[in-house]
Image: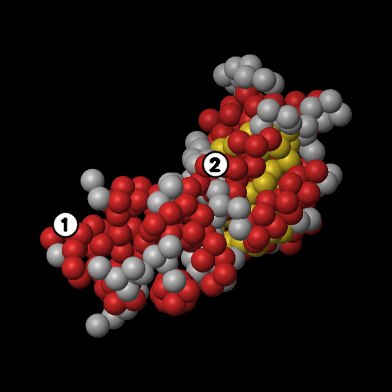
Amino acid sequence: MSKYKELQNAFIDKVEADEYIGLDTSILFYNKLMESIAKPLKMILLFGKPGTGKSVLLNKIYHDHKDERPLFLISTPILSEKEFLHTLYRFLFQGKEPPEDLTFNRFIQMLHAVKDEKHIIVLLDEAQLYEPSTMEKIRLISDTRAIKFVVALHKTDREDLIAKEHFQSRIWETIELKNGTVHDAQIYLQKKIVQKNFFEVANMLTKRNVKLIHRLTGGNYREINKLMYTLLEIYDYYEKNQPSKIAAPTFQNKYIEMAGLKLGYIHA
């Protein structure tokens, strides 16, 4: 297997905690979110365009702190409202199974009864996929202060649901993740490659390469991953079939553009 083929695995889009890259901006967002979690807030809104790192950040926070505080992660939306309530019940009562006849009103009463002794934090990813009725229940649950929600969702028209006046008074903290700068993209790429011990490939990446990658992807980390995966696929092909084509000691922008064409970032 060529080094390019092997390195492609580093750019498969994943949300595990070990995919977190410690950029200046991502460290800033990490610390800001932890500071918000420590405050007596009912809800925290984490939003940004797809590919800005929301899921990876939530996974990193959960991985780092789940053993030191009552922190729980719902990474895949639970679309059944009954199962959603049951999941929160298990979180709150250390895995105890909920009564089969648990209703929302009864759950709210339970939360009010234990709010002085029990406080948990629920990291809720992909919240844009929940129905408005479920989001309204989340709002009411947060009012009890027994459960604090960190609500992560894409920055789309659907976020208006969260930003309604009756919700805004309960959020009290909003963190917006944005696409990376050229500098962020350079550090991101270097760290991604070096983490896999491909130092030779890391040295092939020039500032000119990074500027082009940033221009084509807008600094979106998911799009950077896709572009790099495709670029490495092209280099793997040439290494196997026409190695003289990629004999230069650095990546050539024409191959980055070729990857951009394949992905539709450039229109011929």
Position above or below: 182 against 160: below
Q: How far apart are marks 2 and 1 (CA)?
A: 34 Å
Residue 115 on image: x %, y %: 82, 30
Residues packed near mark 2 inside 10 Å, few (<14), some (14 to 19) or many (20 plus): some
Which of the two residues, 250 or 52, is positioned nearer the viewer here?
Answer: 250
Residue 58 on image: x %, y %: 60, 45
| Outermost residue to the left | 241
Secondary structure, mark 1, is: helix
Q: Is residue 161 left or right of residue 233?
A: right
Secondary structure, mark 2, is: helix
Residue 58 is tagged as: none
Position above or below: 37 against 261: above
Amino acid type at mark 2: Ala
State if disc 1 and disc 2 touch (CB < 8 Å): no
Which residue shows up at 31% across the image and 47% down it?
A: 6
Report the residue marked by disc 2.
17
Quarter of the image that includes the C terminus: bottom left
Residue 156 on image: x %, y %: 53, 65
Report the residue marked by disc 1.
240
Q: Can residue 110 be seen in this view?
A: yes
Which of the two residues, 72 or 171, is positioned nearer the viewer here?
Answer: 72
Position above or below: 232 against 2: below
